[in-house]
Image: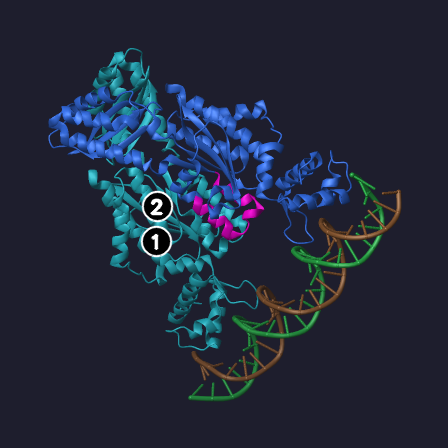
Chain colours: A cyan, B blue, C green, D brown
Amino acid sequence: MQLDERKYLILQAIIDDYIMTAMPVGSRTISRKSGVGFSPATIRNEMSDLEELGYLAQPHTSAGRVPSYKAYRLYVDHLMKTVKLTNDEREQMHEHLVSRSKQVENVIRSAASVLSDATKYTSVIVAPKLGTLRIRHVQLVPVAERTALMIIVTSAGIVKDAVIRVPEGLDADDLYSISRILTQRLADQPLEGVRQAFSEMLRDAEQNRKLLGEALQVLEKRLEAGGDASDVIVGGSANLLEYPEYSDVNKARNFLSVLESKDTLRRLLGREGSMEISIRIGPENQMPELNDCSIVTASYRVGDHSTGTLGIIGPTRMNYNRVISVLDFMGRALSDVLSEYK
Amino acid sequence: MQLDERKYLILQAIIDDYIMTAMPVGSRTISRKSGVGFSPATIRNEMSDLEELGYLAQPHTSAGRVPSYKAYRLYVDHLMKTVKLTNDEREQMHEHLVSRSKQVENVIRSAASVLSDATKYTSVIVAPKLGTLRIRHVQLVPVAERTALMIIVTSAGIVKDAVIRVPEGLDADDLYSISRILTQRLADQPLEGVRQAFSEMLRDAEQNRKLLGEALQVLEKRLEAGGDASDVIVGGSANLLEYPEYSDVNKARNFLSVLESKDTLRRLLGREGSMEISIRIGPENQMPELNDCSIVTASYRVGDHSTGTLGIIGPTRMNYNRVISVLDFMGRALSDVLSEYK
DNA sequence: GTTAGCACTCAACACCATCGAGTGCTAACG
DNA sequence: CGTTAGCACTCGATGGTGTTGAGTGCTAAC
């Protein structure tokens, strides 16, 4: 059996309704809707077909139908009519985003709360991937006897810092000289390439071998760890309780636990890196805990590289339309704000 | 009417039981308990007295009694027998705490998750108050044309950074010289006194007035804002859903919203600064949303100053005993770890 | 002063009838 | 031949009813 025009129309109406109400949709409801000129009986026949095709499911015999994952997939791929954000909304969001300090972490934090406010779902943002950023400046700052803070300023203005041990007897001026050398050598290198650069330096400057060795180690650890917990920011986790699908405390707890595990989130969001919007519906997430959730992500850039991800997590019956518009806009806005230093 | 020995005993037994079960406790239950050698009837009489005195309440006529806030207050003040943590637990917690990077934010993050793991409640930690920290080093790092990052290393090793605009034509070396001057002047000053120091410098060095003016402004803003969102760290928010008092979704949402508002949390925790443990039960929190919650806080020090707060938020019937032991231990452990730089 | 006994209260639970939204099928209609 | 009205059927939701049991308060006896 093929899907004809009318089946599309009806399926769309069902999904639209279900997204709003979270209640199984009956034939009468659809029939009454504007744009559909058929009697409940006709609709019932079509619904029966759609069920057979795997797009709809019945919770029980005498209930309406609910969309299946397959239906959502079809919906986001073909049926959805994109809505635009009003200029008002855009302005408001943009304003919130730029109003705070320019520090990257703060910008991202603001972005997360703007996202969750605008969508009423939970938002997650992953900070720029370190590997793709370029080093702008390296600075060693004395902290205590034989201890220094290594600060790395990148093209995104982000500061990565780490405490390292330094050989005895180096004062602030020594550290500055070393910083200068480090900066000269490493400036404009992507963090990824930093390793070779370091090894070259090790050959050159024998006397500072120990210091550089430690700095290298720390850097490497940073890189492979992929950043720490502060790099994944969650906004609006209270929103999830607004939706009836999480009024079951166990489901809600499940969801919350996922939100607390930053590693999992990073993994979930960090899969693809294109500018396009990625939508994963229910089981497509490959995580049993998130079988009833959808994740919509977009990515943002710092400078020329696509580096970070922003996303919305919500029930499968989320308002994809709205979420996509918001994410798309915010992705661009975030890229703009963060690329300002470039 | 006065509370005699037996009334204390019974009240304690009731609270202990209620903390475990969250169910109204009846006279039989108490009577059966070891240590109480009276029949249910006797206990009933005593319970009736205790109710009249305001220590107990009855949800409805034919139910058992539940402790009132007044009872919890009495409990934590007088009745509670302190339990010690096992050495095993102490070691385990300490290990988790020091295992990660030494960066202050990471230490605090670890501490929050250790706290919530150990207590099964939600933990909140407020980073050291800036005002009491001493400046160790100030460094300006070029980020882009006319933009520099001002990094302030404090006695706790914390880095406060802020983007500031600088006059045109200053290169890295100029910034370094300025940093040196700043460091010389400001080193060992508490952040609180920084303002006067700055004004003095403004008089001295006319030519850098603009730069310093901006730096001063930024610093001031930082100080009065009391830090940004990253200074309040919440751990184990999923834990709250373990308790039947939050199986009502609305209550849970209430709670979650509070946890998301970092400002509120800072206010809630930041009230007192003594090393002692502070316990606020139900309405004592002065926040209607938290009428069913208790907040137990301890403070930790960096160096000599009492500066930050760590706390547990949970239902009023929380296991005060355990929570207090854990907080006390963690307060000390955190102080040790953070004061290492001193 | 303590306790056994007893009548009373009331939430929780199971049971049952009713209601209504929704379906599938069939037959009639244009 | 597609569409629709009509109708019997299903089944969750709702609300009323009776029962159960935990718990109380009171009184009288120990």
Q: Chain of mark 1?
A: A
Name which quarter of the figure residue A268 lies in: top left
Q: Which residue is mark 2?
A: A112
Q: Residues within 10 Å of mark 1 (few under 14, many from 20)?
A: some
Precedes in sequence: disc 1 or disc 2: 2
In 3D space, how far apart are the residues under numbered discs 1 and 2 (Cα atoms)? 10 Å
Q: Which residue is mark 1?
A: A118
Name which quarter of the figure residue A213 lies in: top left
Q: Amino acid at mark 1?
A: Ala
Residue beneath the point at 30% across and 33% down: B223
| Chief SS of the magenta region | helix
- Residue closest to the eye, B175 or A256: B175
Seen in the picture, residue A38 relative to B127 is either above or below; the reply is below
- Residue closest to the eye, B68 or A312: B68
Q: Residues within 10 Å of mark 2 (few under 14, many from 20)?
A: many
Residue B181, position as x, y percentages in the image: 19, 21
Q: Can residue A187 be seen?
A: no
Residue B96, position as x, y percentages in the image: 48, 27
Specify whether disc 1 shares its chain with disc 2: yes
Q: Are marks 1 and 2 in contact (CB under 8 Å)?
A: no
Residue beneath the point at 17% across and 24% down: B178
Residue B198, position as x, y percentages in the image: 21, 27
Name which quarter of the figure residue A12 lies in: bottom left
- Residue closest to the eye, D12 or B112: B112
Q: Chain of mark 2?
A: A
Task: Report the span colored magenta.
Answer: B236-258
Q: Position of B220 compared to B4: left or right?
A: left
Residue beneath the point at 57% across and 24% down: B88
